[in-house]
Image (cartoon, rainbow, N blue to C red):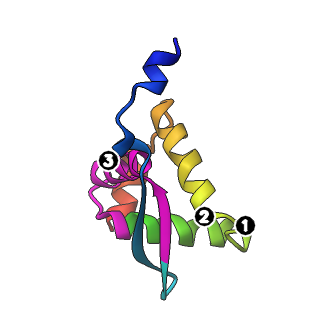
Amino acid sequence: MCEIFAGQDPARFECVTRSVRLSGHATSIRLEAAFWNIIDEIASSQGLTTPKFLSTLYDEVAQRQGEVPNFTSLLRTTCLLHLSGGRPSAAEVTALRA
């Protein structure tokens, strides 16, 4: 069983840092490459660039909760939610593109 996990390509868990602008502030986000691949997929499926998706997500969380205490953890759990079938409705995707 562990061979499946232990034998994976090290490039999947290599940390990658990307610079983005969130709420008008430049910042860097460091995630494993596998998470960036999923985030890119989520953004593309919604017709957004990855920076636009990240900015929109950040702003929506801040609006709902007043702050975003750990955005990188939120991104990881977003990926898990996406992989387990949690996807926005067609109306939500249309609203994001507007």
Name the element at disc 2: helix
Of badges 3 and 1, nearer the viewer stands 3
Asked whether 85 falls inside the magenta stretch, the response is no
Residue position marked by numbered label 2 in the rendering: 71
Q: Local crowd at mark 1 within 10 Å, few (<14), some, or many (≥20)? A: few
Q: Position of residue 27 (x, y in %)?
A: 49, 80
Residue at 49%, 64% in the rendered image: 30
Tell me the tag on residue 32: none
Tell me the tag on residue 41: 3
Q: Amino acid at mark 3?
A: Glu
Against 43, residue 84 (above or below) is above
Q: How much space separates mark 2 and mark 1, taking CA atoms?
A: 12 Å
Q: Local crowd at mark 2 within 10 Å, few (<14), some, or many (≥20)? A: some
Name the element at disc 1: helix
Asked whether 30 falls inside the magenta stretch, the response is yes
Q: How much space separates mark 3 and mark 1, taking CA atoms?
A: 26 Å
Q: How much space separates mark 2 and mark 3, taking CA atoms?
A: 18 Å
Name the element at disc 3: helix
Q: Amino acid at mark 2?
A: Phe
Residue at 29%, 64% in the rendered image: 49
In depth, the one of 42 and 33 nearer the eye is: 33
Tell me the tag on residue 65: 1
First of labels 2, 3 by sequence position: 3
Q: Position of residue 26 (x, y in %)?
A: 46, 85
Q: Position of residue 97 (x, y in %)?
A: 32, 64
Which quadrant of the figure contains the C terminus? bottom left
Of badges 2 and 1, nearer the viewer stands 2
Per the rendered image, the range of residues in magenta is 28-51
First of labels 3, 1 by sequence position: 3
Q: Does the residue at mark 3 contact the one at mark 1 (Cβ under 8 Å)?
A: no
Against 71, residue 44 (above or below) is above
